[in-house]
Image (cartoon, rainbow, N blue to C red):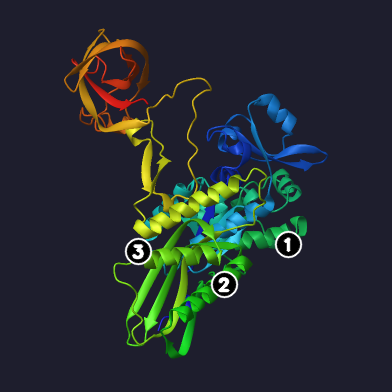
């Protein structure tokens, strides 16, 4: 039998250098949602003035840094997105990330305000080794939209120090740790300044000095921090506990077959679940109801909601829709001796202040309609278009089940008084047309589509869309190739409007082809 204490510890540190601004971007609240590329800063009142507490990467690139006054920051960057610091929301967000990390390791600890440490000893083989685990963590955090730096070491303190202050672990771990600056000790600014003035700039410089001399001059805290980084002393770690699963059930001494008794049990389970979710600040997105018959058969009913909810009436209504959509009605047989309710997916749900205009009622009514239709006809029956990060028109949106995309995408609106830049109807794939146009790279004057000739009365363009660089060597069909597109908004003599594009420039191809991609209303 292997001695647990003899297992070599291994820690993975996650550091989110822009956690505060990334959180605000993700929540898309207030002025921060104006543009994902805009410079964003968070401010708080310090020493009688509004000062920057956090800055996004774009703001850092423009010369803004925490500690500056907001007035100085606006003088440098007039078009600046500003939001207030919310340390409580940041702590809650970090805790949620830590609970998500429990899926990779059962021992997860938080390193506020922007770090998480995982004890990965004995679990890395589940992900194909340490490299596989690192890749999975990076991909998961990138999907959330978080900037992340990772590092691994034999102690939690060393892993966090390497993530925050390291420049890549060239060579062995001990050498990388000794090359870290004294700032990695985590001491206050006064102590760091004293160490630097004494000529001690790296942890290696400190390690070469007697511990007694360091303690006498800089305090025992510096020696303790150094020993923990070098692995000579272990610090206690407070790990997060996995949230208790939301599972509720009722057992019966005698099988229950009456519909009224079963419905009452449903309602009782939902009310109990609602009470627990309210205590945790959660709302259910998926609910699974299982009925166990006395002869061993099971009936499993699952519903999903587009918005998190803990209202028993909504869940009951959806379960009624689910039962009504069954091909075979539920047969209790000799009765059910156990009924269970499981909530596999729940999300944070905070109380909301009703608005005077009643917009939240309209949103709730629409979400309720989507839930009912999706429950009755299937999750794929009602779809919603969501934005994708692509400038190619046919790849700029993706149709997903509406019940799985609770937050409507914010589509760019055209300037007031201007016609839409994109048609509502797109052909998939674009349809080829015969065009007479000016050469080279001129607008169309006449085109033939579906054997009908159209004379161009008005045109607007071109709108040039460059090919995606990683597909420049692809084929020449739209969606596959790496050719430039010139789009034109066309109106023919009858007032009908089309969206045409030339696939390729004459310097890219001898005879570029033309396509019609959409129709304007």
Q: Quadrant of residue 224?
A: bottom right
Residue labelled with disc 1: 220
Determine the secondary structure under disc 3. loop
Residue 317's spot in the image, x, y percent?
47, 64
Q: Are marks 2 and 3 in contact (CB under 8 Å)?
A: no
Q: Is residue 404 left or right of residue 159?
A: left
- Residue name at image x 44 percent, y 52 percent: 370
The circle on residue 325 is 3
Is residue 501 or residue 377 the one in the foreground? 377
Answer with mark 1 or mark 3, whichever residue precedes in sequence: 1
Q: Is residue 166 above or below residue 289?
A: above
Lateral position of residue 270 relative to residue 374, left or right: right
Q: Residue furthest left?
A: 451
Task: Classify mark 2: helix, strand or loop.
Answer: helix
Q: Which mark is residue 472?
A: none
Question: Farthest residue toward the right?
Answer: 48
What residue is at 49 percent from the left and 61 percent from the top? Answer: 101
Give the class, few, some or many, for how many residues have Cα within 10 Å of label 3's Cα (few <14, many ≥20): some
Q: Residue 163's x, y, as percent?
A: 53, 51
Mark 2 or 3 closer to N-term?
2
Number of the front mark, 1 or 2:
2
Left or right of 170 on screen, residue 59: right
């Amino acid at each position: 039998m292997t001695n647990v204490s003899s297992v070599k510890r291994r820690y993975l540190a996650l550091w989110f250098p822009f956690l505060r601004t990334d959180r605000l971007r993700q929540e898309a609240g207030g002025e921060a949602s104006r543009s994902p590329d805009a410079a964003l800063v968070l401010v708080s009142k310090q020493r009688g003035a509004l000062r920057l507490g956090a800055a996004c990467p774009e703001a850092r690139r423009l010369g803004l840094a925490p500690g500056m006054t907001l007035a100085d920051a606006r003088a440098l960057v007039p078009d600046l997105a500003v939001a207030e610091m919310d340390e409580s929301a940041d702590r809650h967000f970090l805790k949620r990330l830590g609970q998500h990390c429990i899926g990779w390791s059962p021992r997860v600890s938080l390193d506020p305000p922007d770090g998480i440490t995982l004890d990965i000893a004995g679990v890395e083989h589940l992900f194909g080794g340490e490299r596989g685990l690192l890749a999975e963590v990076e991909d998961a955090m990138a999907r959330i939209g978080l900037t992340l730096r990772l590092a691994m070491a034999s102690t939690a303190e060393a892993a966090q120090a390497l993530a925050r202050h390291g420049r890549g672990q060239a060579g062995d771990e001990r050498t990388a740790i000794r090359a870290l600056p004294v700032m990695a000790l985590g001491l206050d600014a006064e102590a760091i300044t004293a160490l630097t003035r004494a000529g001690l700039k790296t942890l290696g410089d400190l390690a070469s000095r007697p511990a007694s001399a360091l303690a006498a001059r800089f305090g025992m805290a510096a020696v303790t921090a150094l020993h923990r980084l070098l692995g000579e002393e272990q610090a206690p770690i407070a790990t997060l506990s996995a949230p208790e699963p939301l599972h509720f059930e009722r057992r019966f001494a005698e099988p229950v077959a009456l519909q009224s008794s079963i419905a009452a049990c449903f309602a009782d389970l939902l009310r109990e679940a609602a009470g627990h979710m309210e205590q945790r600040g959660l709302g259910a997105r998926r609910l699974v109801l299982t009925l166990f018959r006395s002869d061993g058969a099971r009936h499993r009913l699952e519903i999903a909601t587009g918005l998190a909810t803990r209202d028993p009436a909504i869940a009951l209504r959806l379960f009624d829709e689910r039962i009504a959509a069954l091909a075979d009605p539920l047969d209790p047989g000799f009765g059910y001796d156990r009924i269970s309710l499981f909530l596999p997916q729940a999300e944070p749900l905070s109380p909301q202040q009703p608005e005077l205009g009643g917009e939240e009622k309209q949103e709730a009514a629409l979400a309720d309609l989507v839930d009912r239709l999706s429950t009755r006809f299937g999750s794929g029956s009602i779809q919603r278009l969501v934005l994708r990060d692509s400038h190619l028109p046919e790849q700029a949106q993706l149709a997903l089940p509406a019940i799985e995309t609770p937050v409507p995408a914010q589509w760019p609106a055209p300037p007031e008084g201007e016609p839409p830049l994109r048609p509502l109807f797109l052909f998939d794939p674009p349809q080829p047309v015969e065009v007479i146009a000016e050469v080279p790279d001129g607008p169309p004057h006449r085109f033939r589509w579906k054997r009908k000739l159209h004379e161009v009365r008005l045109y607007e363009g071109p709108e040039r869309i460059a090919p995606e660089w990683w597909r420049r060597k692809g084929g020449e069909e739209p969606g596959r190739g790496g050719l430039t597109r010139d789009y034109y908004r066309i109106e023919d003599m009858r007032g009908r409007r089309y969206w045409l594009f030339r696939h390729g420039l004459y310097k890219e191809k001898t005879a570029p082809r033309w396509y019609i991609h959409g129709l304007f209303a």
